Amino acid sequence: MTPNFPRLLGDVGGTNARFAWQDSPGASISHAAILPGQDFPTLLDAIRHYLAQQQLPQPAECCIGIANPIHGDIVRMTNHTWAFSISEMQQHLGLQRLLVINDFTALALSLPSLPEADRIQIGGTLPKPGGAIALLGAGTGLGVSGLVHSLDGHWTPLQGEGGHVTLAACDERESAVIAQLKTRFDHVSAERVLSGSGLVNLYTSLCQLDGVTPQPERSAADISACAVAAGSVLARPDEPHERLSIEAMDLFCRFLGTTAGNLALTLGAVGGVYIGGGIAPRLGDVFTTSRFRERFRGKGRFISYLDPIPVYLITAKSSPALLGAAQALEG
């Protein structure tokens, strides 16, 4: 055993917990596994199950990227029931070191080394070397992060809660949807529409605006499947629930473009904007041919600023955040 190794790596979202292993310095990440969060009462139980399932020895260090802000020792997940003390978990696992960071911070750390095969470019030209990088992605929630190149040549990840910024409308239909959402939520954040539950919120709001009774059993997966089956978010079938599901996905892509463009302007992300999460990468051509890019660049006088910024859709089959977790332990 090498000092500080082996290492346990985790990427914990509101739905699934992904784990992997690194045996020694420079070793490839191995023993990747996905565990449904609902199957375990605590994160500690999930970790112990993973180690036993993979027949792995005692890890020396561990980094967990988790879908939650990290403030102090106690972590209570926003989109899951898990809560824990970092210090107590370190003690229970017998770790020399336990680092807990935001999951999108971990994902951001992986971006400079993300292979071209694991991403699809949507518009723009080439990133500016050393320019800030923006990251956002919709899944169980809406994660937001970024990277800033420091003077010493290293990348510094940003830790924030940009998924909870106020949602902005660009036309009357979007304004009507937001007004409908305001009857249900005190604050209509971007996450209220850019997430799995957000897709359902969009569909339900459109039904209410058009006088259609929503189907309570219609899930985010059902809504996405309608758009994928139609092959475009611009399709308008006669069946109202299919039509409104496809429109919900159209709104999702538009709102994501608006939010991504806002983030690019805020960070000055001339190094590129990356789209992760569990929803957009599964849409394929439905997303790349949507109005996402139109809304991304639709900033009036600053269209020329945004036009050359490339947007990359992350398509990696395994979680790049696990590599980012490994890199965080090197910091």
Image: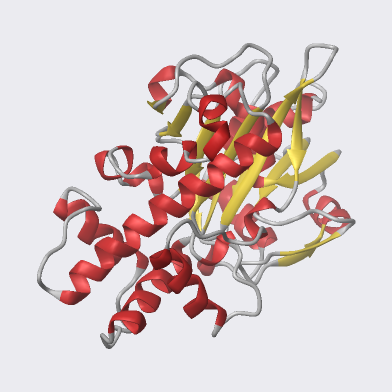
The residue sitting at the front extreme is 301
| Count of marks placed on residues | 0
Residue 55 showing in the rendered view: no
Q: Examine the image and state in which quarter residue 21 appears.
A: top right
Q: Examine the image and state in which quarter residue 4 appears.
A: top right
Residue 224 showing in the rendered view: yes
Instruction: Return the x and y of residue 176 as percentages of the image width and height.
Output: 44, 73
Residue drawn where x is 28% and y is 87% of the image:
211
Residue in the foreground of this view, choosing between 235 and 11 = 235
Residue in the foreground of this view, choosing between 167 and 316 = 167
Is 26 on the left or on the right of 210, as rendered?
right
Residue drawn where x is 57% and y is 67% of the image:
40
Above or below, comparing residue 266 to residue 137 in the picture? above
Residue drawn where x is 28% and y is 81% of the image:
210
Is 274 on the left or on the right of 246, as rendered?
right
Above or below, comparing residue 233 to residue 215 in the picture? above
Q: Quadrant of the C terminus?
A: top right
Q: What colour scheme was applied to this rendering of the protein?
A: secondary structure
Instruction: Return the x and y of residue 260 as percentages of the image width and height.
Output: 54, 42
Q: Quadrant of the N terminus?
A: top right
Above or below, comparing residue 213 to residue 271 in the picture? below
Above or below, comparing residue 3 to residue 59 in the picture? above
Instruction: Return the x and y of residue 305 as percentages of the image width and height.
Output: 57, 26
Residue drawn where x is 40% and y is 25% of the image:
121
The residue sitting at the left extreme is 238
Instruction: Return the x and y of residue 224 as percentages of the image width and height.
Output: 29, 58
Residue in the foreground of this view, choosing between 73 and 222 = 222
Q: Examine the image and state in which quarter residue 45 appears.
A: bottom right
